[in-house]
Amino acid sequence: MQNKGFVKLLAAALLLVCLFYLSFRFVTSLDDNKAEKGGMNVTLEVSVADIVRSLSGYNNSPIFNEALDATRIRQERLGDNFLKIFQEEFEKIDPNARLSTIFSTLELIDKIQLSTSNDEVINVLQQEVNSAIDSSFNVLCSRIDQFGVVQPNIQRLDVEG
């Protein structure tokens, strides 16, 4: 029985190790109770002005840029449809200017020709904006689903943009 002291030392060491690991469980159970009340809210806002600028091929036309700036200011005040206000501001600056000269880019060549009217250009732009927003929403949903979030609540708010 010469190893009696060694066995007691080993038992005490194992007891301390077990208590150490059990302490983690105690701490995490306290955090679990707090986490049940928690959550996260994320808001993704798609900028229609940036989409329009992109669809124009980042056109540097002074009329285009002036109309975009005026539209941003007016939309903040009124909250109306961005493209509707944009068309009004563009036509106010130069009533004879055509949106088709700005938006007949390689990306939209099959939808907008130089002879396309301003109303038709705005309709095409609205479709493209809606498509970009839908695409952003779908990417967000697929990425959240990829990480296996417990209770995702993903909503698309249709705010005039």
Image: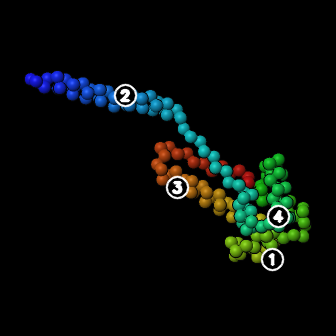
Amino acid found under the numbered disc labelled 2 = Ser
Give the image location of residue 13, x and y in percent: 26, 27
Give the image location of residue 94, x and y in percent: 90, 66
Q: Earlier in the sequence, mark 2 or mark 1?
A: 2
Q: Earlier in the sequence, mark 2 or mark 3?
A: 2
- Residue 34 to residue 141: above or below: above
**Residue at x 90%, y 61% (from the top left corner):** 92
Contact (CB < 8 A) between labels 2 and 3? Answer: no
Residue 92: assigned label:
none
Amino acid found under the numbered disc labelled 1 = Ser
**Residue at x 52%, y 54% (from the top left corner):** 143
Contact (CB < 8 A) between labels 1 and 4? Answer: no
Crowding near pointer 3: few (<14 within 10 Å), some, many (20+)? few
Residue 23: assigned label:
2
Residue 115: assigned label:
1
Of tags 2 and 1, the one toward the viewer is 2
Give the image location of residue 88, x and y in percent: 85, 60
The residues tagged by marks 4 and 2 sit, at their Cα atoms, a distance apart of: 65 Å
Local SS, label 4: helix
Q: Earlier in the sequence, mark 3 or mark 1?
A: 1
Tag 4 residue: 64
Amino acid found under the numbered disc labelled 3 = Ser
